Image: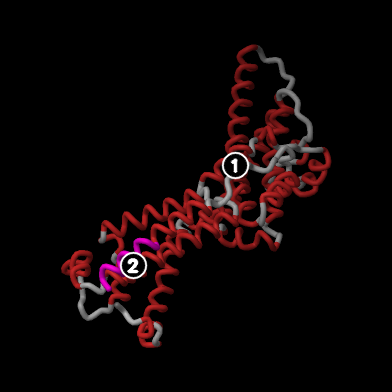
Amino acid sequence: MVDPSVIMTPVVLIPYSACGLLIVIYAWGRFNTPPSNRSSTRQALYWWSGLGYVLSALMLFAGLCFLLQAGEWRTLIFGPADNPALSASLMATLAMTTLLPSIPVLKRADEWLLAVFLDWAEIPAEVKRRAALMTPRSFEVTETDVAELCETYGDEGSGHASARHLRGRRGEGLELSQYRFTRVVKLYDRIGKLAGEPRYSHFFAETQDEFGELEKRVGEFLRRAGASLTLAERQDGLDEGEAFEELIAERRAEFAQQCSEIFVALARFLARAVLRSERSERDIVRRLREIGFSAAEPMNLPNFPIDSLAVLALTLFLYLFFASWMFA
């Protein structure tokens, strides 16, 4: 059996600590890949699950260190790639980082653990559920909103839509198209204002390129939509026959589809922004209501499964116990 006093000496403790730090860095990188994982669920679930995955990786590392004390296990795991000159801790670190893809058993175990903790964190299920509820019909526009938007988008020289196409009430025909357009403008404007809030600075820094592409897409839509609505305004009320009315109805349907698509893209981005930046479910709901989703309600999502984590921790502990007993 290994003498505990030997393990606690600096000559042994420092290398193991350094290797453990590398495992933590690598495991955290795995959990946070892609970077959008962090904005795909509530922050409490994200941190609890990330911590659980990192601790599980450390326990696997500790178990490997025990196993690799025996030459048979080194040969079994690494085969000809084994280097007897390297310590068990360093070989265990290589096995769980650089060499992980080439060791099927460890690779499958790591992938299973990662999948378990991502599932417990509701990644990416939560952001999808939340975005699905943020529909155009659930988004409100008031006359006060229109007045504020007119100050921002009222100058046609800015390349955006004319203020005369912004309206705070639903209607029929052209008025309905203008209302749909206004919903997109308001949502885009509210997201842009979030970028200036300190709480959201990290999210917009992380998604700088993505938000830039979204701004280009929305800007192009606003310019085309403004021109389309201006033309529709000139044609509104003309009586050119049944064929003309069918053509107008078809164009309005196409415009409605375009508004819906750009609104959905903005809503998905907003869902990620609030999940990444707001501290609690109450804060998320409050923010969504302020923006215009007045019917937003707290989602009945499961808390982090502490019981399941305890079972997993017990399983790993037994694994380490038997590994240390076999090779003591």
**Residue 121, can we see it?**
yes
Amino acid type at image mark 1: Ala
**Residue 267, x across and y down, in percent:** 62, 43
Residue 215, percent across and down? Answer: 61, 50
80 lies above or below 107: below
Residue at the spot x=74%, y=20% of the render?
A: 237
Marks 2 and 1 sit apart, C-alpha to C-alpha, by 41 Å
Name the image quarter holding residue 236.
Answer: top right
Queried whether the magenta region covers residue 326, the answer comes back as yes
- Front residue (pair 82, 277): 82
Local crowd at mark 2 within 10 Å, few (<14), some, or many (≥20)?
many
Would you say 292 lies left or right of 53 here? right
Tell me the residue at 31%/57% (across/down). 107
In the depicted structure, whether residue 243 falls above or below residue 187:
above
Q: Is residue 38 left or right of residue 324?
A: right
Residues shaded magenta: 317-328
Residue drawn at (35%, 85%), measured in percent from left and top? Answer: 6
Q: Quadrant of residue 83?
A: bottom left
The numbered mark at residue 63 is: 2
Quadrant in which residue 255 is drawn: top right
Residue position marked by numbered label 1 in the rendering:
131
- Residue 198 percent coordinates (x, y): 69, 63
Disc ID at residue 247 = none
Q: Nearer the viewer, residue 250 or 113?
A: 113
Which of the marked residues, 2 or 1, is nearer the chain's N terminus?
2
Which amino acid lies under the numbered mark 2 shown in the image of this protein? Answer: Gly
